[in-house]
């Protein structure tokens, strides 16, 4: 089996290390993001342990964790706050544990839980959308983010 090694920093564009876009510009919410690779290592006693580490290289099949940290640096609650993160072309969406996250399979034109989305085939028929077709992940906050409050959002992907 031939495995393609991708130097992480050289492939940052391929992995789409594009920062998440925050909407509602009147808010003073700062967003920082990290991409970590999930590795399974065996300790000296032979037990497997999963770790998250800064990636130097990634290969197809590597599991990535995208972490977006937010903080309301303003003096007022941030309202109508939305974070949209494009999914890198070299990464297939896997999951998110954030209950209020939605995804898009059409470049951000429509949003919803993956199970509710469909894709129209060339012949006009529709079928359920697949995780590898996700183009964006979005979090629309339904409650204001209080001044000074911080939190994090996460999603997982697999290098194609």
Image: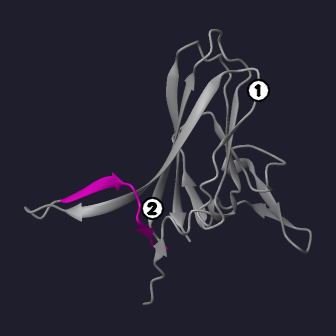
Residue 157 percent location from the top left of the image: 53, 58
Q: Is residue 27 above or below residue 126?
A: above
How far apart are labels 1 and 2 at the CA level? 33 Å
Residue plotted at (70% across, 26% down): 81
Using the rendered view, name the quadrant where residue 134 is placed.
Answer: bottom right
* 52 magenta-colored: yes
Residue 97 percent location from the top left of the image: 51, 41
* Quadrant location of the C terminus in the rendered image: bottom right
Left or right: residue 6 versus residue 48 is right
* 27 magenta-colored: no
Most frequent secondary structure within the magenta stretch: strand
> How busy is the neighbourhood of tag 1: few (under 14 within 10 Å), some, or many (20 plus)?
few
Residue plotted at (64% across, 52% down): 18
Q: Is residue 116 above or below residue 12?
A: above
User: Could you say whether the residue bearing mark 2 is in a helix, strand or loop?
Assistant: strand
Q: Along the line of sight, which residue is nearer the eye, 95 or 14?
A: 14
Q: Is residue 25 above or below residue 103?
A: above
Q: Is residue 83 above or below residue 60?
A: above
Using the rendered view, name the quadrant where residue 123 is placed.
Answer: bottom right
Residue 39 percent location from the top left of the image: 33, 61
Using the rendered view, name the quadrant where residue 126 is placed.
Answer: bottom right
Numbered range of the magenta stretch: 48-60
Colour scheme in use:
one colour
The residue labelled by disc 2 is 63
The residue labelled by disc 1 is 25
Q: Along the line of sight, which residue is nearer the eye, 59 or 26?
A: 26
Nearest to the eye among marks 1 and 2: give it: 1
Residue plotted at (70% across, 51% down): 136
User: Could you say whether the residue bearing mark 1 is in a helix, strand or loop?
Assistant: loop
* Quadrant location of the N terminus in the rendered image: bottom left
Q: Along the line of sight, which residue is nearer the eye, 122 or 134?
A: 134
Residue plotted at (68% across, 50% down): 115
């Amino acid at each position: 089996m031939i495995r393609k090694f991708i130097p992480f920093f050289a492939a940052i564009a391929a992995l789409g290390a594009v920062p998440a876009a925050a909407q509602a510009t009147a808010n003073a919410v700062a967003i920082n993001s990290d991409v970590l690779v999930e590795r399974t290592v065996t300790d000296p006693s032979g037990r497997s342990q999963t770790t998250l580490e800064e990636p130097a290289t990634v290969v197809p099949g590597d599991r990535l964790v995208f972490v977006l940290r937010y903080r309301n640096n303003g003096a007022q609650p941030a309202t109508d706050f939305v974070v949209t993160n494009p999914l890198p072309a070299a990464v297939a969406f896997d999951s998110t544990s954030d209950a209020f996250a939605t995804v898009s399979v059409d470049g951000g034109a429509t949003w919803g839980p993956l199970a509710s989305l469909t894709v129209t085939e060339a012949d006009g028929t529709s079928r359920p959308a697949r995780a590898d077709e996700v183009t964006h992940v979005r979090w629309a906050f339904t409650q204001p983010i209080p001044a000074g409050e911080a939190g994090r959002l996460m999603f997982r992907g697999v290098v194609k």
